[in-house]
Image: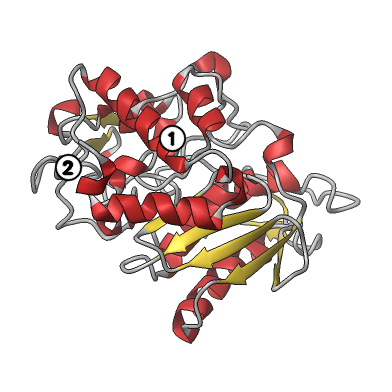
Amino acid sequence: MGRDNFPTLRRLINNVNRFNSAFRGQSYENVVTALNRYYSQRAGFTFNPATPITTAALHNEIRANSRITSGLFEADMMLTMAQLNQIISNRRRRKVTSDLGKRWTTTIAYRFGDTDGTWQNTIRAALRLYQTNTCIRFWENGNAGDFLIFNKGDGCYSGVGKLGGQQEISLGSGCETLGIAAHEIGHSLGLYHEQSRPERDTYIRVNFQNIASGYTGSFDKRSPALSQSLGIPYDYGSVMHYAINSFSKSFGSDTITPLRSQFSYTIGNRVEPAFYDYKAVNLMYCSRSCGASLPCQNEGYTNPSTCNSFGVFK
């Protein structure tokens, strides 16, 4: 089917091309075509981008993205062709982006593409969470060659790591919550989805029989030999984890089952980043922020935002 049969998907492609320097000269449509081909290979049949997924019980980015899911990796990740090729061939390490060239400096400029004050304040609040718990600082309307632009696009999506130049984070209708904003900002800093970690089968069971037709590729895990988790344990409570019913083919058919049942109501957190989300960002960006480290126990660490307090579980 041509993209023009899916007007929302066409708008996604046009917006990505317009608002992201990384796709100037190489249309995002090439990525969508390659992604759909990958889904077909993983499913064993021709992927239909019109395949419905059940979103009634979801309260996250997948619900907001129901009409553009086929144009994004794992529902909300806007990848470059190089990133997609690396992931498909299992050369990309998963938990964080491992290529230092894809990371930002610790001061990141950003702008707003919409004047809605309430929407802007939600985004500012999400940025403050990272500022309070990491060494990252966000500079509103900062004059920098590489910067984030927050838009009200068709759904919630972000690039992964620094793509270069102007880089979009879309927080459109259904995305205007603190937790979803924090999730997409996490992607822009280099965080991938938690359930794609290579050791995930020790912690969750993926119920492939309950996944909507053609979307098994959204539940791939990475090779252990190519994984870089920074020594951070698997986290059911990560703001980057899928919910139990993500990509479900029908209401009540869970696609993910925690092997420790007490975490059934923990995964899919879209309230705010968890302790280990912040720790991952700090290990990526902030190892030199403090002259000396405090004596921490139980996997705690010196909070690089202040250098005189601990990063602690909440």
Question: Dot 2 surroundings within 10 Å: few (below 14), some, or many (20 or more)?
Answer: some
Q: Residue furthest bottom?
A: 117
How many callouts does the rendering have? 2
Image quadrant of residue 174?
A: bottom left
Q: Amino acid at mark 1?
A: Val
Q: Residue furthest top?
A: 225
Residue 62 x/y as whole percent: 29, 52
Q: Residue at x 58, y 64 (%)?
A: 149
Label 1 CA crowd tier, 10 Å (few <14, some 14–19, many 20+): many
The circle on residue 2 is none
Where disc 2 sits, the SS reads loop
Name the residue furthest right.
291
Q: Is 27 displayed left or right of 241 in the figure?
A: right
Q: Which residue is mark 2?
A: 50
Residue 7's spot in the image, x, y percent? Answer: 25, 54
Q: Residue at x 41, y 61 (%)?
A: 180
Q: Residue at x 65, y 46 (%)?
A: 162
Q: Is residue 274 visible?
A: no
Residue 53 coordinates in the image, percent (x, y): 16, 45
Circle 1 sits in a helix, a strand or a loop, which is it? helix
- 81 vs 255, left or right, is right
Q: Quadrant of residue 44?
A: top left
- Badge 2 or badge 1: first in the primary sequence: 1
Residue at point 38%, 37% (across, down): 32
Label of residue 31 in the image: 1
Looking at the rendered structure, the kind of residue marked 2 is Ala
Marks 2 & 1, CB-CB < 8 Å contact: no
Task: Please indicate, yes or no, whether residue 144 appears anywhere in the rendered image.
Answer: yes
Location of residue 24 with respect to 44 vertically, above or below: below
Q: Is residue 282 above or below residue 148?
A: above
In the rendered image, the quadrant that contains the N terminus is top left
